[in-house]
Amino acid sequence: MNRTLYYNYIDEKLHALAIRIDTNGKLNLLQLHMHSESFYLHFLNLLYGYALENLNKTLQNVEAIDLIDHKNMLIVQVSATSTKAKVESALGKDIIKKFPSYRFLFLSISKDASNLRKMKFKNPHGISFSPTSDILDTRSILDEVLNKKIVEQKEVYEFVKNELGSEIDAVKLDSNLAMIINILAKEDWNDDSHVEPVHKFEIDRKILHNQLDKAKCLIEEYCLYHGKVDSKYSEFDSMGSNKSTSVLAKIKREYLNKKDSGSPDEVFFSVIEVLKGKVIESANYSQIPIDELELCIDILVVDAFIRCKIMESPEGYMYAAS
């Protein structure tokens, strides 16, 4: 299920970030704390629909408050320390009196705060604060992610991937491409799916010809991996298993099924989603992180685009031939 894949990825990245913050803090390396504050500002806005901004933009070196949301009347302290003393210290600061109608949130970015949610706190200025719901940590945030609708969960996944995702691992990419090519090649495909000679038209003109907008960036980024895919196809084909024909025919068939289902961009991304589903459901699929899976599928579909197996091809402009 995509839900499980998205959740597992988010879970892994948030826990890894928390561990790094904790370790760096013990070494007195605090730069990651600052970057994490910015990360969580945007993350909480996406996850909860807040309109948080950094209070330091308007007030320098403010104690007890790091983020503020004037629309939803929230003030947030972001901390790598998760103790009762830390929370009470924030609640006792004089600046809290400036926000009598606001709600106070405490965000623990490196420690589990489950025990804090069970405690009672001194709140001398009487600001709205309920430990059960107003103390956040990785665990409580993941609970929120888990209960999101799949469309919303995917948005969170995309955000976390963009913020915390790793650089492309060439070794993993090589093995993952091989595995996925194997899986797709075993899919049934109609004998009447005639495979035409492979011609790769000039990429930018084909993008323009098909009026692709959102897919343009993906194609421009992953067309660089055409050589790697070609190498993998050649490896398999040299062993007598005609993987390139089978995989490209499979991708083309899915494109033809989706061809009239929406705009060119919608069709392009629909093909990617269908192929991803085929791989995940395959008995031959050995689970890999969702971002690695999506990377490989994206690369294969872009390669098929270059080879003119999907989308309309302009006449007279050949990218290359193979």
Image (spheres, helix red, strand yellow):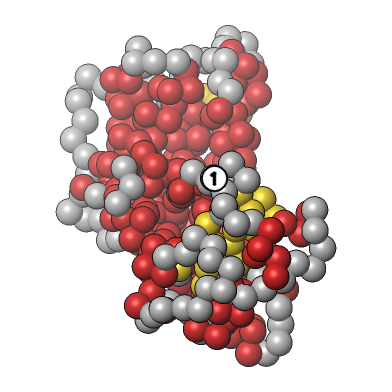
- In the image as oriented, which residue stretches furthest toward the top? 315
Q: Would you say residue 131 is visible in this rendering?
A: yes
x%, y% of residue 225?
56, 45
Expressed as whole percent of the image width and height from the top left, the position of residue 167 reads: 59, 60
Q: Residue furthest bottom?
A: 26
Q: Which residue has dot 1 on it?
A: 72
Q: Of residues 189 and 238, which is closer to you in this image?
A: 189
- The quadrant holding residue 178 is bottom left
- Relative horizontal placement of residue 247, taking residue 172 as reference (left or right): left
Residue at the (70%, 70%) spot, across then down: 94
Q: Nearer the viewer, residue 207 or 155?
A: 155
Q: Is residue 195 visible?
A: no
For label 1, count other residues whose C-alpha is less than 10 Å away and answer few (under 14), some (14-19) or many (20+).
few
Q: Quadrant of residue 283?
A: bottom left
Residue at (21, 39) in percent of width and height: 187
Q: Write the residue at 27% across / 61% down.
A: 286
Residue 302 lies, with reference to residue 126, above or below; the image says above
